[in-house]
Amino acid sequence: MPKLRDMPSSDDLLAWYDRHARIMPWRIPPQERKGGAQPDPYRVWLSEIMLQQTTVAAVKAYFERFTARWPNVRALAEANDADVMGEWAGLGYYARARNLLKCARMVTDEMDEIFPSHYEDLIRLPGVGPYTASAVAAIAFDNPAPVVDGNVERVMSRLFNIHTPLPLSKNELTQRADTLTPQLRPGDYAQAVMDLGATICTPKSPACGLCPWTDNCVGRQSGTAKELPKKMPKKKKPTRYGFVYFVQREDEALLLERRPDKGLLGGMLGWPGSDWSDDPTKNPPVQAEWQSIKSQVRHTFTHFHLHLSIMTASVSHRCVPQRGEFVSKSKFKPSELPTVMRKVFNLVK
């Protein structure tokens, strides 16, 4: 068994990153960065908000659509709320989209469209937590802030053989990450350690032989790397139930309702429905002859499973709904529905 070095070297990781950096639409490649190319803080911030609890693969197309439609923070700040929520549809965690607009408007109206460069100022922005503040400070402004996402937690827990389960070990892992963050090229380093976790130090079958820190890894030396990081047992998710009402007018217009800004799916368009609970109360938006669809829509949110029973009805053009508005067939875009509501549409059709 080879002996461990005293401390992992950021130089070793950066040399690996220079050769193997992933190509991202929001990223300045390391060679261009060395040549003087500067990251756009708006694109870095936007990507980091989108990447919160969401995979790179899922985010890429959304990021490219957003930046094509709203190429800078002022354009986004001046956007219509409904347009932004529609573009966000399907990406999930919709409070992020609402905070995205709040943040863009704060930066535009109060900061002359200039994002702050330091953690202490970034974390005061709407929707920006400790991870995102560190990531923007490091990647956009090259400030030495420790950036710790799930990939970095895994790398640090294995590198230092930390067996305290997450989330209890989060502070220790952040401190370890901080000790390794260099003063030179901290932005590239932050992206390098995330890439290492995503491509080499993976949750299953890590490719230790390709890792630039393989000789520094206490977990590999101890034979415990594959079982790290340890996590607290997950609580069983409860199941909630609800009714959803699919109403089509004789001219093919559909009845839609925008949900309140606060709460789950806040600000998103959807079909009128009941509460979501153990014993939901039927709450149809119009008087009609309702028919039920045998199949249910099933969807999983972060904290619970949801089973929706679908009720359908056809109404005349004289129908006045108690809530919601009819949207003409030409203006209706299924892509602007959140995933659970799109499942309803697909099942009805």
Image: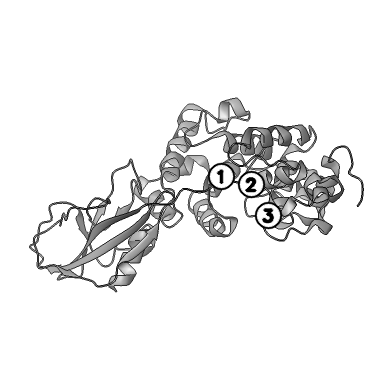
Q: CA distance from mark 3 to mark 1?
A: 22 Å
Q: Residue at x 41, y 55 (%)?
A: 89
Asked whether the viewer can see residue 77, the reply is no
x, y percent for residue 131: 59, 37
The amino acid type found where label 2 is placed reads Lys
Which residue is identified by label 1? 232
Depth-wise, is mark 3 or mark 2 nearer the camera? Answer: 2
From the image, tell me which residue sits under label 3.
198
Q: Earlier in the sequence, mark 3 or mark 1?
A: 3
Q: Which mark is residue 152?
A: none
Q: How many marks?
A: 3
**Quarter-wise, where is residue 201 in the image?**
bottom right
Of residue 256 and residue 198, the one placed in the foreground of this image is: 198
Residue 315 % position (x, y):
11, 67
Image height check: is 225 above or below 332? above
Q: Is residue 55 above or below residue 43?
A: below
Q: Which residue is mark 2?
A: 230
Q: x, y percentage for residue 70?
A: 49, 49
Q: Secondary structure at mark 1?
A: loop
Amino acid type at circle 3 is: Ala
Where does the C terminus fall, quadrant-wise? bottom left
Classify mark 3: residues with Cα within 10 Å, few (<14), some (14-19) or many (20+).
some
Question: Which residue appears farthest toward the right when viewing the image?
Answer: 2
Distance between the Cα atoms at labels 1 and 2?
Answer: 7 Å
Numbered disc 2: secondary structure = loop
Q: Element type at marker 3?
A: helix
